[in-house]
Amino acid sequence: MRASKLLLAVLGYVATAAAAAGADGLRLADALRLALAQNPALQVEQAQAAQAHGLALQAEGSFDTLLDGGADYTRELSVPPFGPPAGKRVLGTGYQLGAARQLRSGVRLSAGLDAAAYQDSALRADQQQGGTARLGVTLALPLLRGRGAGEVAAGEDSARLAAQAARALLRHRAAQVLQDTLAAYWRYSIRLALLEVASSSAERAGSLLDSTRKLVAASQRPRADLVLLEADLADKTGARQAAELAVAEARHALGLLMGLDGAASAALGRPLDTLPAVAELAPVAPAGLAQQALARRDDVQALAAQVAGAERLLQGARGQLRPRLDLELGASYARVTAGASHYGFLSDPARHPDGPSLGARLRYEFPLRNSAAQGAYLARAAELASLQARQKGLGQEVGSGVEFALQALASSAAQLRVAQRAMGLYEQAVRQEMVKQANGIATLIDVINVEGRFVNARTSLLNTQLAYAGALARLRFETGTLLPAGAAPERFELDAGELASLGPLAPQLAAPQNPSPPPPP
């Protein structure tokens, strides 16, 4: 599993979704998938997760087995200034092979084979050729500093926990992108609906002005009525222009979240998905949801991993405050040959065993002030204290965030029902006022006032629908239910319909439906 992969396997899907986004319309699922695949902030988080994974591998490499080997060959000729051309000749060959490994217990184990052969023409005939071979094993035991995995493996454990935290932060960033994209998609949809409201209101104001002009020309209405109607049309034309700008701003914000440039954002189609339906909510204690959120949310898990990593580093820094006392134990076995070929000394039978040897050495090391270790310990302790304070603050933030999101969802749901009823009443009032004005019972100012209240009611209804959709997305984010639990950071299933509903929260928050009464006997 590589954290550098995209959160979704949509490499082949992105181009198709991007084309569909600017064609007949924009589906919520397409917007969410493009945001997860192309959002710049999410790509930065992916790179950081990949970096943390690489650093964890690098720290793990401290305990890899190291192999080394070598061979050498020397040839030395010595020609005297006077005398025969033949002089002293010395040939030498050598072979080395070794292995070493640092164990997580603090013990360092190494073994090596070192063999050498020579040929020296200046020696006696029976001593001109010879060789040595030595096989040795060394065991280094830390008696004070670095004893046990608590100190030696602190760096590796901390890097592994940092990689775990980075993967959790990647999931948390994905959840943030989903919430932001959901809110931006609904905002874009509502801004388009508000533009339609402003446009229809301006059209009605223009139609009323045109019809009144005809009545004025026919001397059936006073010319003074035109002043009020022209002012009303100018006001509603300005509102339509402001709504057009709000649509462009909402479209641009959604395009940025989807990782689109300016031209692609401007070409986004209309949202095709309808806003979430209002759910009947049951009374639920926020404390229970907050506890569940603390267990679900990835930023909480990431911070817990960071705290654990800081504790491991502090444990390692504490060990560095002690003096260093190492015990090195060694055992070796050597053989010496004489009269053998300098290439075949290992197989030559003329050997003279030198026998095994054992050795032990104690090494003590301690700086007089030990400022480096003390400074590292203080820095690690301060880092841990900072992370623990952040952990406490995050727990409080999650609790208050869940409580506020739940309250906002319930409040917006109640407001939405009231706004829907007010909308119907104002629509009926406008029709009645138009009839009264035609019959001479109501004035133009009465019609304009009721029309304005009707527009305000439509605007309030749309804004309340947007508030409900945003509160629903925020509650899903605050409770950590936007992403499937336990899904790998690189891949998870995406269901736009499920994300636009209560989802996993439905069993707790949805009010039970009243069962239908049984049929009479």
Image (cartoon, rainbow, N blue to C red):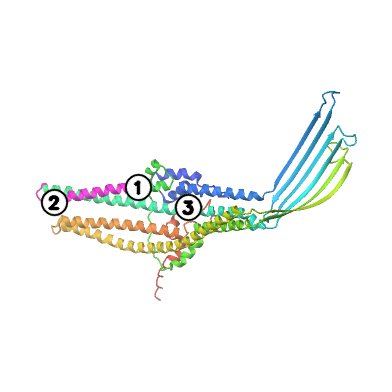
Q: Earlier in the sequence, mark 3 or mark 2?
A: 3
Q: Residue at x 71, y 45 (%)?
A: 67
Principal secondary structure, stretch drawn in magenta: helix
Q: Earlier in the sequence, mark 1 or mark 2?
A: 2
Kindly report the distance in space between the C-alpha atoms of the residues bearing marks 1 and 2.
Answer: 37 Å
Q: Earlier in the sequence, mark 3 or mark 1?
A: 3
Q: Is residue 355 above or below residue 121?
A: below
Q: Tell me the residue that label 2 is attached to.
A: 225
Is 26 in the magenta? no
Q: Which numbered circle lies on residue 173?
A: 3
Where is residue 420? Give x, y as percent.
31, 61
Q: Tell me the residue that label 1 is attached to.
A: 249
Q: Is residue 246 left or right of residue 109?
A: left
Kindly report the distance in space between the C-alpha atoms of the residues bearing marks 3 and 2.
Answer: 58 Å
Q: Secondary structure at mark 1?
A: helix
Q: Amino acid at mark 1?
A: Glu
Q: Where does the C terminus fall, quadrant-wise?
A: bottom left
- Looking at this rendering, what residue extends furthest in the front direction? 368
Q: Amino acid at mark 2?
A: Asp
Residue 359 visible in rendering: yes
